[in-house]
Amino acid sequence: MKHRALSILVRSPFLLLAALLAAGCSSDGSPTESQIQAASASLSGSVTLGSQGAVMNTTGEASSGVTVRVQGTALSTTTDASGQFHLPGVPTGNQVVVFETGQSAAPLSIQDIRPNERIRVDVTVRGTSVTVDSMDRSSEDP
């Protein structure tokens, strides 16, 4: 029975391809962490909150706790006390990054994200709008 199944697998190029692809996945069939990282980018930067509808602490600096998420995915992180964030595993292609405070959400479209790209973006969020203060894009060594 085992030999028959192997014979069918070898004769069908589609089944053989599926078996080879599955061999590179984790036990549940999902991509491994290294496969995800190789086909994704990292996003980091800082968030400053403007005065229009934003939460400011008493010193006038950006407060911590802004959620940074990639729309349509489970990827998210929260800014630290200085407004810094790091988000690895961002999918390639065109993505919308959303900056959420307790009161509002401000979307930012980032186009043509490439595998192993490192993107540094510093933004100012005012209510539902986001302004890019600076953006630097570079390739990471795989």
Image (cartoon, rainbow, N blue to C red):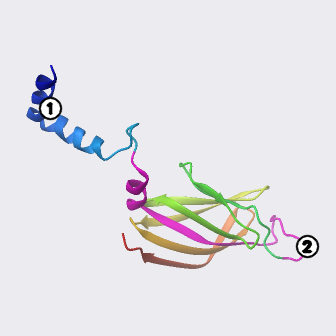
Closer to the camera, 1 or 71?
Answer: 1
Secondary structure of residue under mark 2: loop
Q: CA distance from mark 2 to mark 1?
A: 67 Å
Which mark, residue 47? none
**Which residue is at 86% across, 76% downward?**
60
15 sits left or right of 135 in the view: left
Which mark, residue 9? 1
Q: Position of residue 80 (x, y in %)?
A: 72, 67
The residue labelled by disc 2 is 58
Q: Which residue lies most toward the top here?
A: 1
Secondary structure of residue under mark 1: helix
Quarter holding residue 62: bottom right
Mark found first going from the N terminus, 2 or 1: 1
Closer to the camera, 85 or 6?
Answer: 6
Closer to the camera, 21 or 100?
Answer: 21
**Which residue is at 47% across, 76% downward?**
137
- Where 142 sits versus 106, above or below? below
Quarter holding residue 112: bottom left
Q: Position of residue 131 (x, y in %)?
A: 65, 73
Amino acid type shown at disc 1: Leu
Q: Which residues are magenta?
A: 31-60
1 sits left or right of 96 in the view: left
Amino acid type shown at disc 2: Thr
